[in-house]
Image (cartoon, rainbow, N blue to C red):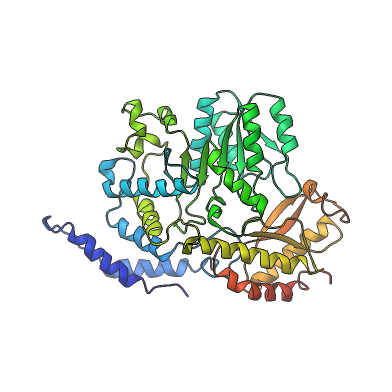
Amino acid sequence: MLESATIGILGKALGRLDAGFTGLPDFDQNYDLERIEAVLMEVAELMQDNYPYFHPNYAGQMLKPPHPIARLAYMLALWLNPNNHALDGGRASSQLEKESVARIAQLFGWERFLGHLTGGGTMANLEALWIARQLAPGKKVLASEQAHNTHARVSEVLGVSFQSVPCDAAARMELDSLRSLLDEGDVGTVVATIGATGTGAVDPLSEIVELRERYGFRLHADAAYGGYFILADNLDRETAKAFEALSEVDSIVIDPHKHGLQPYGCGCVLFRDPEVGRYYKHDSPYTYFTSSDLHLGEISLECSRAGASAVALWATLRLLPLVENGEFARGLSRSRAAALDLYERIRSDARFRTFVRPELDIVVWTPAGRTAGEISERSASMFRAAAAEDLHLATLRYPASLLRRTWDDVDFDQDSVLCLRSCLMKPEHYDWVGRIWSVLDQVADLGGAER
């Protein structure tokens, strides 16, 4: 089941890489290969204690296997192990990072910008909010109550006041609530979530952009999960409208290690105005940040960073360009189509309940029940029953306050409901929805759902 045909390609590429250093004198590299093999076989045994993240039967958390080209390029780079903090630590990989980040920025129509890769979305969001704090010291950060908890935690780290904005029934930031908080004043930054990690919901970005014109706050888009869906051709019109407004925000975070087919960890932060580079400590003149001789270590809060991440990303973009109707874009559309297919099957079956139509590729539902507690128990039972059939789902605790607007016949005897959740991130999920549904159909009664 684990793809291994590409290992031969890695051997050929390693030979070509080695050819670039043939002028060096030999030195002793004797390793005990038998001991190495023994330990590696032990590791292989231990790693079997995992869910099959690579397989379409894993339809739970947002875990997407890297593309073979990314995996191979990352491994190839490890023979040199470049560090993209400074040019002398990774000349080639630093250049590949600049080119890769520029291609991501072009997704949002940005040609002049400041940006770099990070160890993941948390660090990328930290940098975005750190810059926001520099530009609006002492002012608070707002994000929806369904935004990633990163923003509240990062705000605390930065010593910035944070406040959640209530959501509507579709798990998107509620505009009336946002206006009320803005009217109170003292808001420096609004975070718009472009693909909530719970439901995949996309905040109404175009309307938030209009509010920025009135209130003057800084607008950050956390598109760590959903950013690449700007290339999908089957989004709902309202969702597509939000993606069209991404070019207007002040900063964007996107995670290549989610939908970008990269190994962990690979995040990316982008700033529309390259002049924010003056807030990073550096030795170069101010104009350095708009030059072509970008020193990545001088525009990053992180120091050592894996050059292998940049190499893997560049290779993937070389093979699968970020273009409309390209192979990469079609994969995103297939994931979205898979989510809609599964959602419609669930929605039309009286044994289940739904409450939000997928905006991207995340489907959330529950077995039917009369009370919140009963529904939660049935969700937990169905989760276990599906796992016993090798279908691996995820769970989500969802606030009763949002569900009351949709489920008026449910007795909410607890503050939240345990829901079932699937991230159909793999393009292969499009062809596997029928099989996934057959298992759900089989285990629905085992989970106690009512017909």
- The number of callouts visible is 0
Q: Give the residue displayed 36% in from the left and 33% down from the top.
A: 290
Task: Look at the image and tell me whether residue 36 can be seen.
Answer: yes
The residue lying toward the viewer, choosing from 219 and 281, is 219
| Residue 33 pos. (x, y %) | 27, 68
Q: Quadrant of residue 187?
A: top right
1 vs 292: above or below: below
Nearer to us in this view, 328 or 13:
328
Horizontal side, residue 55 vs residue 370: left or right: left
Task: Give me the residue at 32% from left, 46% from top.
Answer: 94
Q: Position of residue 107 (x, y in %)?
A: 48, 49
Up/down of 43 relative to 243, above or below: below
* Residue 30 image-quadrant placement: bottom left
Quarter of the rendering occupied by the C terminus: bottom right
Name which quarter of the figure residue 363 lies in: bottom right
Look at the picture and state if 123 lies above or below 36. above
The residue under the point 51% across, 47% down is: 254
Give how far across and how far down residue 72 sits, in percent: 36, 63
Q: Is residue 451 above or below residue 135?
A: below
Q: Is residue 85 left or right of residue 176?
A: left
Query: Residue visible at 17% across and 56% down?
Result: 21
Evaluate whether residue 57 shows in this view: no
Horizontal side of 90 relative to 441 (left or right) equals left
Query: Measured from the top left, where is residue 131 in percent x and y?
Result: 49, 31
